[in-house]
Image (spheres, coloured by chain):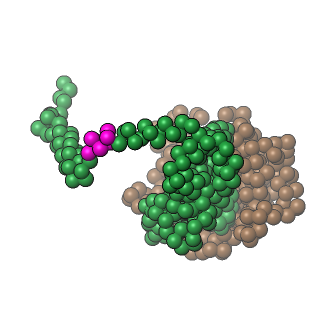
Amino acid sequence: MQEGTPIIEFNDVNKVYPNGTVGLDNINLTINKGEFVVIVGLSGAGKSTLLRAANRLHDVSSGEILIDGQSIVTAKGKQLREVRRNIAMIFQNFNLVKRSTVEKNILNGRVGYYPTWKTIFGLFSAADKQQAAANLQRVNLGEKLYSRADELSGGQQQRVAIARALMQEPKIMLADEPIASLDPRTTVMVMDDLKKLNEELGITVVVNLHSVSLAKQYASRVVGLRAGKLVYDKQIGDVQDGDFDEIYDGKNQEVKEA
Amino acid sequence: MNTIPKKSFAQKWHIKALVWTAIVLALFIASCAMTGVDVGAFLTGFNQFMQIFYEMLKPDWSYVPFTIKPIIQTIQMALIGTLVGSIIAVPFAVLAARNIVTNTVIRGTIRFILNLVRTLPDLMLAAVFVAVVGIGPMAGVLTLAIFSFGMISKLFYEAIETIDMGPIEALTAAGATKTQVVWFAVLPQVYNHFLSYFLYTFEINVRASTILGYLGAGGIGELLQRSLGQFRYDRTAIVVIGTFIVVVVVDTLSNQLRERLQ
């Protein structure tokens, strides 16, 4: 791991929604290669907005976001798609195509590497199909390759989503509340999967979480947001138990314990 | 204490409802008077009707072999027309869907075209196409294709607007192009809807194409027109029975298939 090389940089980033809600308020944040960053904060604190700004699923109102030194705010067309290709994302609701097979869903992660017409005719290379099966085995679901996605449980779907994300051969993995709709056991599996990607493949992982205890267990760095502002940023070694009261304003005890 | 808000005068006496009822009644009576609807004429014509009906009770069974080919042609017309129309409808439906195309100008234009197409009655289209391409099944196919296009594109873009947006987000995040997003995240979600609408439209088209022949657009309707013109009501009976059987069979099959698609 190359500690200290920035891979995601937010410079003075602001986001105001058309209805006037402030999503992000002057965010300055640099995430380095190989970090496992957990972002904590209440619902509506801007966690999702921050992640979605990083791959420009959301546009920001002002400021600059650099991915590996390249601006994603001004990127257009092919250039934007190529930046996005390096940033995988998993979601709270998994976002699989439920009626398609697991294999097709995983290959969906690869479409950015092909010209449109080739993907429409299903002309994925044998190597990529092989890789799809291998990625599924990595999350211990190898035998589900030809099942329909909606036949799988939530935890399994999330792991298929991780396999799909890996098809991008990403440098960065964004995870937006990846375990919010999972039970405690599958939560551990999914978090362990993310940790493995971080340690074995050196992928930079940025995860939004509600759970402070999970944050302390997995993160190498914890970032706190409140009302769109960055209010907390510490390496895991420096995190104190009392710190989170500041982020949660001492109001949401049950969220902390979750 | 709970204070209930006071109803206004209009609300209390249902003024709106009363006014609307009066307007509808007035329009009904006025249009009866203007168009000269005469219930009496229907009653005097009833004898004539009974006579035709009586003749139709003795079908000319020897006419059956002549109806087989036109019936098959009717089904073929419906099938080709529906297929062509529904395939062309796919890209239009995608472009008309609010959740796929955010550009209001493009979407508005497409929807305007679709609305325009849907306002054309199929019988009028058939009359026009008979004039353009001549008498025969080609006119029927074109009519049904345009009719199917209008109907399926509308049903289909409404289906697209109900899909789960999650996969679209996922594909976009993976660096997919717009076309790839539609192909991999949108269409798989509405594939079954599409098949179901196709079958439903096919059902309607089989019924419609029996009538189109009356205008010279091919199919069983031509025999209907001919037998009526020759006052051969015994043959008309055969045509009616044949049409009835075909429509029932197609409806039943299509309904069963559509139920399995759910």
* Residue B257 visible in the snapshot: yes
Identify the image quadrant of the N terminus of chain A: bottom right
Q: Main secondary structure of the magenta part?
A: helix
Quarter occupied by residue A107: bottom right
Q: Is residue A75 above or below residue B44?
A: below
Residue A158, horizontal then vertical, whole percent: 70, 45
* Residue A5 visible in the snapshot: no
Q: Is residue A170 left or right of residue B74?
A: right
Chain letter for the part of the structure drawn in brown = A
Q: Is residue A242 left or right of residue A191?
A: left
Provide the residue span drawn in magenta: B38-44
Nearer to the camera, A203 or A52 = A52
Nearer to the camera, A74 or B247 = B247
Residue A193, horizontal then vertical, whole percent: 77, 46
Q: Is residue A135 left or right of residue B118?
A: right
Q: Is residue B21 left or right of residue A232?
A: left
At a point 82% along the width and 54% down the height, the residue shown is: A132
Residue A144, horizontal then vertical, whole percent: 81, 42
Quarter occupied by residue B120: bottom left
Nearer to the camera, A49 or A242 = A49
At a point 67% along the width and 44% down the height, the residue shown is: B62
The question of residue B47 being in magenta is answered with no
Chain B tint as drawn: green
At a point 63% along the width and 58% down the height, the residue shown is: B77
Nearer to the camera, B183 or A19 = B183
Identify the image quadrant of the C terminus of chain A: top right
